[in-house]
Amino acid sequence: MKSQPKEKTTGIQAKLAQFFNSLHINNRFFYVLMACIVLFMFGFIYPSLFLFSKLFLFAVSLIFLLDGFTLYFVAKGIEATRILPEKFSNGDQNPISITIENRYTIAIIATIIDELPFQFQIRDFSLTHKLKPQETKKLNYELKPTQRGEYHFGDLLVYTKSSIGFVSRKFTFETPKTVKTYPSFLQLKKYDLLAFNQQSRHHGIKKIRRIGHSFEFEQIKEYVQGDIIRDINWKATAKRNQLMVNQFQDEKSQHIYTIIDKGRVMKMPFDGLSLLDHAINASLIINSVALRKHDKAGSFSFSKKIDNFVVAEKRNSQMNLILESLYNVKTDFHESDYSYLYATVKRNIRQRSLLILFTNFESLDAVHRQMNYLRGINKNHLLVVVFFKNTHLEEIAAKPAKTIQEIYDKTIAEKFMNDKKLIVSELKKYGIHTLLSSPKDLTIDTINKYLEIKARGLL
């Protein structure tokens, strides 16, 4: 029986603590209070102002209480919810919306503070809007993640004030949620199969003439420059008195693997993303394109060992498997082991396949150290080595040099750029297909390379 008064006291203390925690006095009140103090100071010099100062202070106090009463008269004056997507797309703008409802009978000014994940490093995020009585608004903003992984959202805070602006009331909505950031799946829609038909006008996508090389006959057509001579139909040529060729349907269900080097050479940042994340995004899209082209797509990553291996298949769940696999790619600072890559490819990929290797070489010595393994892989498969231009060096080389230091920097930049060209020549010398691309054009260039290989029937 004696514990009941203590419980009541504890409940009152909790409510008082909650009240004072939500009560915030704005700067406008302090500015008016400072003006009141100045009036009192002049009241000592001019007694006629002293009475006016008292009346002014009484009016300010009354307005302050009225302002606070207006905000606290309604228990739940504001209702707010945050709407998040199920997952984020890495490197893309992801939409987020906040729905806020004003349940007051007066117009209020609401300042919304969303506790964003620490990965964004945004510490001054706020949205301020004026809401009419009983009005509901939907506010939208976007976030661009640059790292894969989990993003933890905290509470949603709403500070409300009336047009008087002396007092603000804080509403806290406990809406913690975790959103996973996957490779750039939003780009999949952009590079849909419709982008590659003859009516395509997408910037950067090349129209490549498709030549089938399977044994499934399609039609006989007139010979044009670029057709394969061995496909000439001599009987049809004699009948029509002009060269005619057999055209076959494009061979399908070929094996396509994207291989991602996750070693230290892929840690270099570009446009907020590392080269590894650019490669992962391009890998996701090229696998999607391959599946839409009726090929079998798979992927894996390597460094000191092979990880996230997805066998090339053509099934409905294949893109989900690849997406989860690429999401789980973790970077390290090891030197990538190409001998282990060669052994894994030889042991696990028995059928001749197109292997698209995303890596980065900065010098000829680095290529020479791995050349035997690359040649070994290319012997049984069609290997395409994709590596990156250093756009920062290109900017330095393009600037006119005026000082000795700028001349030195420009010379070094041109040397490294020339090394990249020599790497391309060195790989082509051994019959290895290469693609030197800037990170921002990586996806387009890789798709064009894949379409070129398919059109030429090289696989």
Image (cartoon, rainbow, N blue to C red):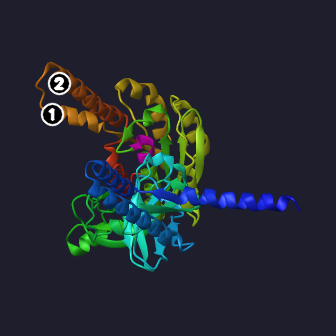
Spatial CA distance of label 2 from label 1 is 9 Å
Badge 2 local density, few (<14 within 10 Å), some, or many (20+)? some
Q: What element carries label 1?
A: loop
The residue shown at (54%, 74%) is: 74
Where residue 182 sits in the image (x, y, percent)? Answer: 51, 54
| Amino acid at the residue labelled 2 | Glu
Q: Is residue 324 above or below residue 85?
A: above
> Dots 2 and 1: beta carbons under 8 Å?
yes
The residue shown at (44%, 51%) is: 145
Residue 66 falls within the magenta-colored stretch:
no
Q: Is mark 2 on a helix, strand or loop?
A: helix
Sequence-first disc among 2 and 1: 1
Q: Is residue 120 above or below residue 290?
A: above
The residue shown at (40%, 36%) is: 268
Q: Residue 406 — which label?
A: 2
* Residue 201 in sight from this viewpoint: yes
The segment highlighted magenta reads 273-278
In the picture, residue 318 is in which quadrant?
bottom right
Where residue 360 sits in the image (x, y, percent)? Answer: 40, 36
Q: Residue 399 — which label?
A: 1
* Left or right: residue 319 compared with residue 450: right
